[in-house]
Image: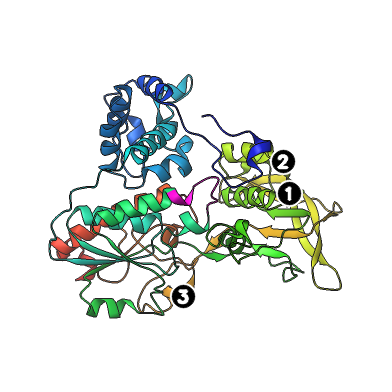
């Protein structure tokens, strides 16, 4: 896909990939073999009829193609930008065994963008079936669950703690990777299905699930994500100038620090910035730091680039823009000055040992290899966990040993009757599309539960 040159794009937060032209989309879609047993569909967490929409693109029937996608996916413009198709649908494409798989993600983005440019067709409003469902959290899992339930005729209300809907889509993913206008468009589509969204409403504080039951809600989906940042727990971590990735990205994306002083939410960026981690969040933070004015940005990662969980294209784009990857390196303490500001990171070099529980080779420190990286600002991007704010207020809700909600992976059913959950609050930090898949499965289960509660014998 065409993209903006690095020297140009690091000066602003405009989107980097430019999208496919019509002729390229048609030619790429024509490569699809239209397999009788398409493996690509099995690789899609939201079950899109991929050969069906590709055939329509190949025929130039773009409006029909987006309608085909929206039979299963209410957020195609988002998925076409941030879904890791290379490890899902495209990985299953038979053409990928001897060459390049079909660029399914690029084509999904193409038809979604085509629809936006030509004008979105409002869906037909389904008639209400008499049941009300509450969805807690407006991230990808919540939006998907709500949209699917609305299509079934349920009256759905989403309760969102922040002042803008979208969850991680608006606070975690930068504008240059996922423009907020795209998120707003997808949220508006879900609203057009009849879904109501209540903002600045913290379930667990503003009101409780018991309060919602009294208001007539009969089933609940919890999709609050994993928003509690993890830290390294090493000396000096409380020095000024050290951010969690959650705070750094929320200030930058949702609160628009990059438009300061138009928006009164600045972020301190020194000349030299270090980002700790190797996932997509780390790449996002590093690329934001460059755009916010840092002269040097390094990524400190304890394994090699081969083990980085970030998408390959995001690592490549970060390096094109000037991010320096310092691999096989692990921080052991932060160094500060007399005023309490961070000035350096003492690190130790690592080597890879035997595989750990993640399947990746475990990093092992090399004794006597310590060294110091001079730094002005640090962003810690090593993952996040479940925020206990809601979970502590729901009596009887079973959690697993890591503090996430214990829910059936196929149905989303929790330990409480009528309460379902999915996404990062169940699995831990994962991908947007996996959260959407969980929301879709939960919507089917909620529909089944409200039609026949006996289908869930654990709640009798």
Q: Earlier in the sequence, mark 1 or mark 3?
A: 1
Find residue 426 and report its horizontal and vertical position in percent. Answer: 42, 61
Near mark 2 (Cα within 10 A), the count class, few <14, some 14-19 or many ≥20, is: some
Q: Helix, strand or loop at disc 1?
A: strand
Residue at the spot 62% in from the left edge and 46% down from the top edge: 12
> Label 3: few (<14), some or many (≥20) within 10 Å?
few
User: Does residue 264 appear to the left or right of 217 in the view shown?
Assistant: right
- The question of residue 453 being in magenta is answered with no
Kindly report the secondary structure that dominates the magenta region of the rendered protein: loop
Q: Could you say which is closer to the camera, residue 170 or residue 242?
A: 170
Labelled disc at residue 270: none
Of marks 2 and 3, which one's residue comes earlier in the chain? 2
Q: Is residue 410 visible?
A: no
Specify whether 344 is left or right of 440: right
Q: Which residues are magenta?
A: 173-181
Seen from the viewer's position, the closer of residues 407 and 382 is 382
Numbered disc 3: secondary structure: helix
Give the CA separation, mark 2 to mark 3.
39 Å
Magenta region includes residue 176: yes
Q: Which mark is residue 322?
A: 2
**Residue at numbered disc 1:** 297
The disc at residue 389 is 3
Residue 114 percent coordinates (x, y)? 36, 35
Secondary structure of the residue carrying numbered label 2 = loop
- Which residue occupies 62% across, 38% down? 317
Pick whichever, 263 or 31, lies toward us.
263
Task: From this view, report whether residue 322 is shown above or below residue 159.
Answer: above
Q: How many residues crowd mark 1 within 10 Å: few (<14), some (14–19), many (20+)?
A: many
Above or below for 215 versus 14: below
Q: Earlier in the sequence, mark 2 or mark 1?
A: 1
* 1 and 3 marks in contact (CB < 8 Å): no
Q: Are marks 2 and 1 in contact (CB under 8 Å)?
A: yes
């Amino acid at each position: 896909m065409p993209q903006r040159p690095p020297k140009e794009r690091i000066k602003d937060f405009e989107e980097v990939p430019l999208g496919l032209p019509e002729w390229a989309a048609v030619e790429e879609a024509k490569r699809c073999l239209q397999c009788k047993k398409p493996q690509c569909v099995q690789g899609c967490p939201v079950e899109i009829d991929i050969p069906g929409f590709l055939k329509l693109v190949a025929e130039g029937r773009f409006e029909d193609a987006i309608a085909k996608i929206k039979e299963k996916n209410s957020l195609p413009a988002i998925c076409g930008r941030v879904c890791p198709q290379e490890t899902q649908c495209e990985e299953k494409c038979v053409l990928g065994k001897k060459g390049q798989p079909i660029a399914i993600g690029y084509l999904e983005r193409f038809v979604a963008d085509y629809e936006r440019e030509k004008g979105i067709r409002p869906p037909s409003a389904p008639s209400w079936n008499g049941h009300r469902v509450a969805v807690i959290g407006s991230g990808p899992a919540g939006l998907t669950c709500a949209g699917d339930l609305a299509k079934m005729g349920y009256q759905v209300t989403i309760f969102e703690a922040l002042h803008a809907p979208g969850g991680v889509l608006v606070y975690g993913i930068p504008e240059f990777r996922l423009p907020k206008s795209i998120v707003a468009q997808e949220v508006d589509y879900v609203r057009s299905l009849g879904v109501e969204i209540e903002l600045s409403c913290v379930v667990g504080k503003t009101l409780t699930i018991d309060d919602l039951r009294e208001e007539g809600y009969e089933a609940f989906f919890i999709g609050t994500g994993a928003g509690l940042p993890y830290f390294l727990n090493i000396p000096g971590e409380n020095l000024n100038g050290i951010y969690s990735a959650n705070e750094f990205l929320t200030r930058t994306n949702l609160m628009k620090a990059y438009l300061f002083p138009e928006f009164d939410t600045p972020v301190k960026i020194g000349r030299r910035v270090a980002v700790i981690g190797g996932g997509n969040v780390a790449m996002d933070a590093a690329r934001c730091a460059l755009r916010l004015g840092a002269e040097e940005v390094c990524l400190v990662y304890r394994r090699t680039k081969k083990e980085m969980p970030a998408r390959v294209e995001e690592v490549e784009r970060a390096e094109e823009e000037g991010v320096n990857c310092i691999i096989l390196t692990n921080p052991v303490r932060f160094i500060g000055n007399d005023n309490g500001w961070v000035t350096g990171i003492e690190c130790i070099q690592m080597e890879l040992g035997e595989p750990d529980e993640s399947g990746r080779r475990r990093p092992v420190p090399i004794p006597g290899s310590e060294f110091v990286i001079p730094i002005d600002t640090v962003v810690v991007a090593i993952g996040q966990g479940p925020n206990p704010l809601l979970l502590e207020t729901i009596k009887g809700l079973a959690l697993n040993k890591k503090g996430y909600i214990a829910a059936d992976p196929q149905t989303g059913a929790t330990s409480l009757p009528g309460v379902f959950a999915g996404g990062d609050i169940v699995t831990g930090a994962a991908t947007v599309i996996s959260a959407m898949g969980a929301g879709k499965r939960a919507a089917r289960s909620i529909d089944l539960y409200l039609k026949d509660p006996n289908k869930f014998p654990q709640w009798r």
